[in-house]
Amino acid sequence: MLKERVKELLDEAFEEYNSLFLIDFTVKGANEIRVVIDGDEGVTVQDCMNVSRKVEHNLDREEEDFSLEVMSAGATEPLINKRQYKKNIGRDLEVKLEDGSKVAGTLDAADDEKISLSWKERVPKEVGKGKMTVEKKEEIAYDVISQAKVKIKF
């Protein structure tokens, strides 16, 4: 009952704040509600407060006690939602594929079916000794991605 009510309130919050979207939502143990959100332009503390208030102010603690935690998706967390890929265009990703291989590169594009990565790679010259740098591109369907993370540069 509580979980369904919280989900309805979250849906209402995301309708009102439509640049935000749900990443994860759990209700554990003694009604411990944990909500992880992300946004097309990132997530501010105010965004977390707005979503928290939307849920908290519409639940009755007298009826059922609960704790509520609303947080943004961490920068090192895997990408889960297609909207997360779209907001990270231009950033470097490390993508693990279902077959166990890895591809790392700059996210050039993301649509509803696939992403496009590009990277530079050193390969042997066709003629003579040494290596040359070539530009590589690959399109990857979401259904073959087992995990993708943004690579943070310092």
Image (cartoon, helix red, strand yellow):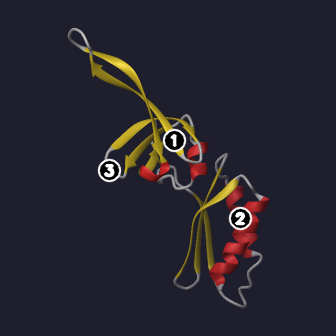
Front tag of 3 and 2: 3
Q: In which quarter of the image is residue 3?
A: bottom right
Residue beneath the point at 42% across and 50% down:
144
Element at badge 2? helix
Which label's residue is closer to the chain start, 1 or 2? 2
Residue beneath the point at 31% across and 50% down:
100
> Which mark identifies residue 130?
none
Q: Is residue 22 above or below residue 118?
A: below
Front tag of 1 and 2: 1
Q: Distance between the residues labelled 1 and 2?
A: 30 Å
Which label's residue is closer to the chain start, 1 or 3? 3
Residue placed furthest toward the top:
128
Q: What residue type is labelled 3?
A: Asp
Q: Is residue 80 visible?
A: yes
Q: Distance between the residues labelled 1 and 3?
A: 17 Å
Q: Which amino acid does label 1 sit on?
A: Ile
Residue 98 falls left or right of residue 15: left
Q: Where is residue 106 in the image (x, y as percent from the top left)?
A: 48, 34
Q: How far apart are marks 3 and 2 (CA)?
A: 38 Å
Element at badge 1? strand
Which label's residue is closer to the chain start, 3 or 2? 2
Q: How crowded is mark 1: few (under 14 residues within 10 Å), some or many (20 or more)?
A: many
Out of 134 and 94, give the one closest to the viewer.
134
Looking at the rendering, in which quadrant would you find the N terminus?
bottom right
The residue that disc 3 covers is 99
Out of 3 and 125, give the one closest to the viewer.
125
Element at badge 3? loop
Q: Which amino acid does label 2 sit on?
A: Val
The residue that disc 1 covers is 115
